[in-house]
Image: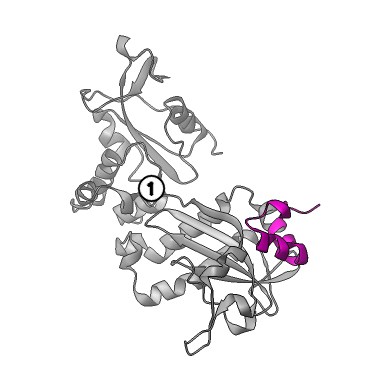
Amino acid sequence: MLPIDIHAAQNVALADELRRDADLLAVHAELMGRDPSGERFAAVLRNTIDQLLNGEVTGRYAWDSLYKTERTHAGTLVEINLQREFKFADGAAMDYRIAGIEVDCKYSQSFGGWMIPPEARGHLCLLVWANDSVSLWSAGLFRVRDHWLNRGSNRDAKLTVKAIHRDKILWLWHDAELPENVLLHMDPSDRAAVFAPQAGQQRLNELFRRAQKRRISRNVVRTVAQQKDYMKRVRGNGGSRSALKPEGILIMGDYDSHRAVARKLQLPAPGEGEFVSVRVIRAGARHTAIPQIELDGKNWVVADENDPPEMAPQLPPHTSRA
């Protein structure tokens, strides 16, 4: 059985191509079988961008702040990190062997900007695109054929896919959601307030005040704290959890018990290595229709901007991570 309905492919031209390309279908089936939702693929892209930004050392959070040489290196890192995540075998002529088939990997931060080397002619390419500014990514398979390519004018004769023939790409995931770069997408005044304090602990406190109800990754924490013991700065016993408790702010981590609190309050549940902060108040008569959570023997709801601060309850004890 084919892994996709070729009669329901993106267009007739692609459907015709698929009928003749068993290898392309086999690679498609293998990749979708390994990562049906695309979550693993998206995590690799998020982590690769963060690796390039190196926020703990540089304090950077935006792609535009990278040097040209770093941006050029992005494609190599994507190729390496995908292979590490999915354990692709080395190819003989191309980067990988997937389902026993040679596949080259090409990444571009500009959609359609994939640079395909002449030696990839006739082979399959895994074309990958991610853009942190719009929080989107795509990955698709493309059979490299001369008449579908622009002629290269650069010294190494690399080629690009003609815009009119991008419809020959069989998308695995198209315009999928890239895990958010919270610092990049914060209101500029909030971001300035986060980075204003000299002390890393104070910067983290401001982050959790101003980026509530959003998943905050470990890398964001590392970038803001710029300290080796950045995780310690989040916890209680002197970290942000302790500092913000009098303001009513809870900071949930990637524990099952914390995720349950987030879900009860209809907030995003923290993923692995993530945090979600929110200000709460004790539930009253006016909150009967609002999601509530029982903590410390009392019911709590998400506070609104007009509610005065009150001491936050204790989060449940840590249980195993999912």
Q: Position of residue 273 (x, y in %)?
A: 46, 46
Which residue reaches farthest front?
12
Image quarter of the C terminus: top right
The amino acid marked with disc number 1 is Met
Q: Position of residue 61 (x, y in %)?
A: 33, 59
Please identify the dominant SS of the magenta region.
helix
**Which of the two residues, 191 or 298, is positioned nearer the viewer here?**
191
Q: Position of residue 18 (x, y in %)?
A: 72, 62
Q: Residue at x 28, y 46 (%)?
A: 204
Instruction: Tell me, yes or no, whether the highlighted magenta stretch contains residue 20.
Output: yes
Quarter location, residue 52: bottom left
Residue 308 visible in the picture: yes
Residue linked to disc 1: 231
Which residue reaches farthest bottom?
155
Q: Is residue 201 above or below residue 317?
A: below
Q: Residue at x 26, y 36 (%)?
A: 243
Q: Position of residue 252 (x, y in %)?
A: 40, 35
Secondary structure, mark 1, is loop
Magenta residues, start to end? 1-29
Instruction: Tell me, yes or no, whether the highlighted magenta stretch contains residue 239.
Output: no
Local packing at callout 1 (Cα closer than 10 Å; few below 14, some 14-19, many 20+) is: some
Q: Residue at x 55, y 36 (%)?
A: 320
Q: Is residue 109 above or below residue 295?
A: below
**Which of the two residues, 193 or 123, is positioned nearer the viewer here?**
123
Which residue reaches farthest top?
285
